[in-house]
Image (cartoon, rainbow, N blue to C red):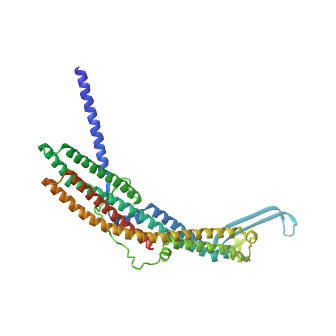
């Protein structure tokens, strides 16, 4: 019997030690996790410098710059130098085809030279096309940066909204709902309230707690998304440093520019236009450029003789102009048709984006106006709901209001608060959308 008790005792001690050790280890992990508190201005700055999407286009831009540099160096020749030794023993054939036997030849060459072959079509057209391609990629990189930053801003605003919802529900729980439930519990004990009223209050309290947890869950999801967009380290947890939502107008649209003009100011539009220009210039390298000649040059300065010690100065200069006309471009015209197809494809993309940009500008203006109205109405409703709730609570404390009236007033207040948070978030999103739609860049 005692042996069994000891076994149980030691088993409990071992289990407790394991649980405590596990808890301590988990606490240590939490302690090592860093917290990054961010505001909207931090999101704008960090996304522009650390976003992997933006970094990808920076690398593409570096490649395009290198390709342009290669194209610009078309005129540079190749330089060569060294020593060669030639020896021949036996038969040799001369220029007229005669064979000579028992020939002994020996010579040595040492020198420096340069050779080049210049394709004038590449020099005139492909160099310009490479420059236009680089300009196009710069505009596309700016557009991608705008998209990345705007997505991060949207995510931050959603995260901030969920955090504000959580705080609003917590304030209602701590300052009002829990107090009322306690009061009703006391009144039930005194016999002046029914238990059903207490049950209803407790149910309402549980509902608010669930809403708070749901807001916290969504907040954590958005915080994780934002951490990914900011390229934060794995051990960094992102938190909102701003606990209040405020509508901020960041764009002045009083000029009311035509949507088509706004579309042409977008970097996507400029980038596609430059890509089309680059393709057209590349096409000219095939059409006009095939009639241009290639220029060849080979020259060297050397010492030449039977051996290095017995040699004489020797120099050479060969120059030539050669026309290479590909019959495939004259008959089948496959390369020309390929370029025409690429140009047509990009013109189609340009038209699609123009229509999209026009719709985005119109929609951004409408959303900004509607959300501004929503914000004003929800703010007025929130003030009224707050007064109604306070008066209901005062009446309930005096015994002139039923609990369900207070519960209903709390529901209206919370809904008004959530409506206000939604309206402000929608307004701020619309402002940043309009900032991009009007042709601005981050």
Q: Is residue 92 left or right of residue 413?
A: right
Q: Nearer the viewer, residue 117 or 363?
A: 363
Q: Residue at position x 59%, y 71% from top?
A: 347
Residue in view at x 21 percent, y 44 percent: 196
Left or right relative to 182: residue 153: right
Q: Nearer the viewer, residue 415 or 334?
A: 415
- Judging depth in this view, the residue of 199 and 295 nearest the camera is 199
Quadrant location of residue 112? bottom right
Specify whether residue 315 is in view.
Answer: no
Name the one closer to the observer, 147 or 394: 394
Residue 269's place in the image compared with 14, above or below, is: below
> The C terminus lies in which quarter of the figure?
bottom left
Image coordinates for residue 336, horizontal then vertical, percent: 69, 70
Name the quadrant of the N terminus.
top left
How many numbered marks are there?
Answer: 0
Relative side of 78 to 54, left or right: right
Residue 267, percent from left and from top: 49, 72
Residue 377 location, quadrant = bottom left
Snapshot quadrant of residue 155: bottom left
- Residue lying furthest left: 190
Q: Position of residue 327 (x, y in %)?
A: 76, 70
| Residue 336 visible in the snapshot | yes
Q: Can you say whether 130 is above or below 200 in the image?
A: below
Q: Residue at the location (49% across, 77% down)?
A: 261
Name the outermost residue toward the top: 1
The x, y position of residue 168, in whole percent, is 26, 57
């Amino acid at each position: 019997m005692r042996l069994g008790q000891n076994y149980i005792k030691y088993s409990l001690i071992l289990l407790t030690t394991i649980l405590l050790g596990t808890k301590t280890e988990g606490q240590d992990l939490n302690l090592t996790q860093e917290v990054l508190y961010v505001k909207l201005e931090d999101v704008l700055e960090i996304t522009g410098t650390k976003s992997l999407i933006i970094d990808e286009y920076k690398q593409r831009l570096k490649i395009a710059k290198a390709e342009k540099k290669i194209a610009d160096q078309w005129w540079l020749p190749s330089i060569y130098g060294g020593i060669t030794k030639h020896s021949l023993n036996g038969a040799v054939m001369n220029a007229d085809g005669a064979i000579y036997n028992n020939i002994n030849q020996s010579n040595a060459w040492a020198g420096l030279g340069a050779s080049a072959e210049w394709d004038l079509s590449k020099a005139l057209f492909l160099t310009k096309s490479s420059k236009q391609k680089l300009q196009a990629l710069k505009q596309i990189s700016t557009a991608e940066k705008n998209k990345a930053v705007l997505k991060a801003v949207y995510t931050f605003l959603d995260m901030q909204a969920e955090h504000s919802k959580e705080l609003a529900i917590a304030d209602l729980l701590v300052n009002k709902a829990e107090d009322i439930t306690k009061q009703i519990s006391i009144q039930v004990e005194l016999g002046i309230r029914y238990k059903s009223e207490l049950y209803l209050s407790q149910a309402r309290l549980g509902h608010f707690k669930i809403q708070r947890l749901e807001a916290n869950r969504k907040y954590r999801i958005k915080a994780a998304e934002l951490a990914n967009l900011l390229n934060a380290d794995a051990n960094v947890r992102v938190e909102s440093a701003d606990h209040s939502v405020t509508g901020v107008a960041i764009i002045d649209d009083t000029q009311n520019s035509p949507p088509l003009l706004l579309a042409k100011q977008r970097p996507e539009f400029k980038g596609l236009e430059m890509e089309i220009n680059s393709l057209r210039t590349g096409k000219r390298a095939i059409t006009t450029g095939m009639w241009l000649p290639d220029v060849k040059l080979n020259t060297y300065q050397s010492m030449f003789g039977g051996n290095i010690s017995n040699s004489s100065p020797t120099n050479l200069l060969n120059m030539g102009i050669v026309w290479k006309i590909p019959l495939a471009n004259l008959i089948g015209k496959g390369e020309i048709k390929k370029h025409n197809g690429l140009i047509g494809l990009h013109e189609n993309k340009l038209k699609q984006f123009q229509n999209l940009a026009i719709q985005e500008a119109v929609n951004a203006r409408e959303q900004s106006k509607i959300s501004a109205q929503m914000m004003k109405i929800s703010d007025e409703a929130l003030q009224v709901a707050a007064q109604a709730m306070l008066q209901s609570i005062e009446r309930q404390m005096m015994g002139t209001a039923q609990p369900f009236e207070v519960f209903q007033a709390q529901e209206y207040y919370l809904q008004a608060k959530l409506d206000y948070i939604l309206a402000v978030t929608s307004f701020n999103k619309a402002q940043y959308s309009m900032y991009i739609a009007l042709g601005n860049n981050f």
